[in-house]
Amino acid sequence: MQRTGIARLPLHWGKAPRWLTIRMQRLAKEMMTIIVDEYGTKNLLKRMSDPFWFQALGCVLGYDWHSSGVTTVVTRTLKEVLNPEEHGLVVCGGKGKVSRQTPNEIVNAGEKFGLTSRNIADLQYASKMSAKVDNTAIQAGYQLYHHAFFLVADGDWAVVQQGMCTQDRTARRYHWVSENTKSFIVEPHNAIVGDVRRELVLNMTAKESEGCRKASVDVAKEPTEKIRRRVIPAKLEHQKLLSEWIPKPVSNLTGANEIGMLSMPRSMNWKALKKVYEFQPSNYEELLSFKGVGPSTIRGLALIAELIYGEKPSWKDPVKYSFAYGGKDGVPFPVDRKAMDQSIEILSQAIQEAKLSSKEKMHSLQRLRQFSPRCF
């Protein structure tokens, strides 16, 4: 993983007012056109995968910078103003039901870009796996409700997606970029940002989970009834063993109950596991990508893998504290001042060169200056 951090993303309901969205679209189109012309589409993809640049963009466009709505409103705005003919860039997907249209939208975009059927299928797979990983392989209590897939003409891509936890009303945003995604299952993210760091998270994408991933595949390749016999006794007879075996959180930053990692899941998709057994996956990515293999099944296999084979999964939350919480002191790592200055310079230049009134430019630059000390 390239960067992790915490950004304030309280879960907000409602919609952005029309007067604001119209203004955001006008400003966004001007800025995106200049950035693409000046730096190219690949550079813009990298910027979208940088959570702090993305947050700054939302601030500049005029949306409430600390809200979960930054993710949904900014990506929707970009989807409205970016088009393949002018920018060589398309945004597919979106919030809620719109996210389900992503595969078809990728096909339409790929055909416009002249990509092959194989290229398009690979892009659909990247979209599917990025969502499957953040909804299933990482289990921190966040259910994905937003998925935006950024696609450029040569087939490079980026993903900005977000999950919600209704129990403590927080959101978590996940950033992916194809250039840095060497594997879909081993620390594939460019960044993960959220409002809290949880003490207990099942993270099957961690390097430390490699043994558990392999053991999970071995378990899944066994006859389904054999797996069932291992799960049911564990639930009914050895609950004390499970409660002693799984690590407990020392403290809870949210004040809420930890989100369901402390016991064997109540249900597993046995029909899906039977099909997995018949398919005999060769690796963890094939297992995870299988239809019907969801969070409960992945967690159950991980718990069995440790109980039977002693292969422990990572229970460490991949989110860490950000620059705003001590970066200037080198925790968790020193501020990359060069990258920060470059990001601000790109946004500032885009504002200056945009065909906007002096008043609009002044307000946009003021918001950028206000954002900078808050997050860096």
Image (spheres, rainbow, N blue to C red):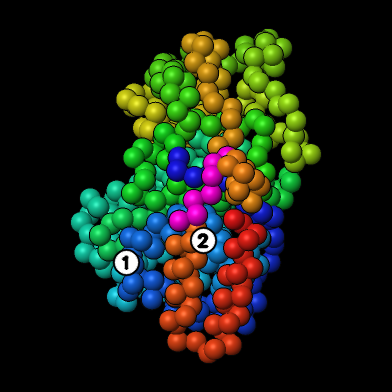
Q: Please tell me which residue is depicted at 69% across the width and 55% down the height of the picture.
A: 10
Q: According to the image, label 2 marks what residue?
A: 54
Q: Residue 3 carries which label?
A: none
Q: What element carries label 1?
A: loop
The correct choice, above or below, for 306 with respect to 208 in the image is above
Q: How far apart are marks 1 and 2 (CA)?
A: 17 Å
Of marks 1 and 2, which one's residue comes earlier in the chain? 1
Judge the density around disc 2: few (<14), some (14-19), many (≥20) Cα neighbours within 10 Å: many
What's the magenta region? Answer: 332-339
Q: In this view, does 282 lie to the left or right of 63?
A: left
User: The disc labelled 2 sits on which kind of residue?
Assistant: Phe
Q: What element carries label 2?
A: helix
The correct choice, above or below, for 309 with respect to 206 in the image is above
Q: Which mark is residue 40?
A: 1
User: The disc labelled 1 sits on which kind of residue?
Assistant: Gly
Q: Please tell me which residue is depicted at 44% across the width and 19% down the height of the picture.
A: 211
Res 85 visible: yes
Q: In which quarter of the image is residue 274?
A: top left
* Towards the viewer: 50 or 92: 50
Q: In what quadrant of the picture does the C terminus appear? A: bottom right
